Amino acid sequence: MSKCVFPPEVITGLNAEIMSLMEDVRGYMRENQASDFQELAVEDRMTMLKARSALTLQLTGMAAWGLYQAALLAEDVIPEGMTPDAVSDALSGLDQAALPTLPASFRDLLGRSDGLFQRVKSLQEAA
């Protein structure tokens, strides 16, 4: 069985941040997204839809990776051959020049996700 190569506090803290960001994204989508979306020009709406899809993809990838590491820390039985996929840098494909037109609260979520992704990526590369 594989063992987690990272200190428990690193994985625990990172997972807490990822889950908190997921909750914040969910809250934004429930409470602000519809009104923010209606205020955007059509081309900006398309940018926001692409960014939302990329954000969701990146967050779910980070959550899967973090939960896998937590399972290793807990010494849970993990089926043979099951490993997390590399987390996709889904946000890198966005047109950075188009993002300033999006609502500041949504851009903040994108920035937080990118910061977490950079940390996960550095851990993956160090493993």
Image (tube, helix red, strand yellow):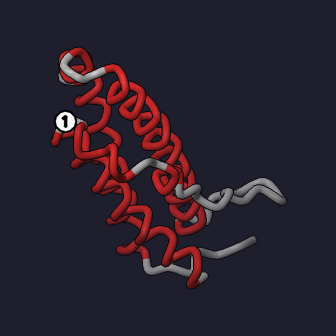
The amino acid marked with disc number 1 is Pro
110 and 47: which is toward the camera: 47
| 123 w.r.t. 37: above or below | below
Residue at horizontal 51 percent and vertical 76 percent from the top: 123
117 and 10: which is toward the camera: 117
Q: Mark 1 Cα within 10 Å, few/some/many (few <14, many 20+)?
A: some
Q: Is residue 40 left or right of residue 67?
A: left
Q: What percent of the width, then of the height, locates residue 67? A: 52, 54
Q: What percent of the width, then of the height, locates residue 70? A: 51, 61
Which residue is outermost to the right?
80
Residue at horizontal 48 percent and vertical 35 percent from the top: 53
107 and 125: which is toward the camera: 107
| 81 w.r.t. 122: above or below | above
| 6 w.r.t. 59: above or below | below
Residue at horizontal 53 percent and vertical 68 percent from the top: 73
75 and 38: which is toward the camera: 38
> Disc 1 marks which residue?
103
Q: Is residue 92 left or right of residue 3?
A: left
Q: Secondary structure at mark 1?
A: loop
Q: What percent of the width, then of the height, locates residue 57? A: 52, 42
Q: What percent of the width, then of the height, locates residue 34? A: 25, 16
Q: Quadrant of the N terminus?
A: bottom right
Quadrant assignment, res 16: bottom left
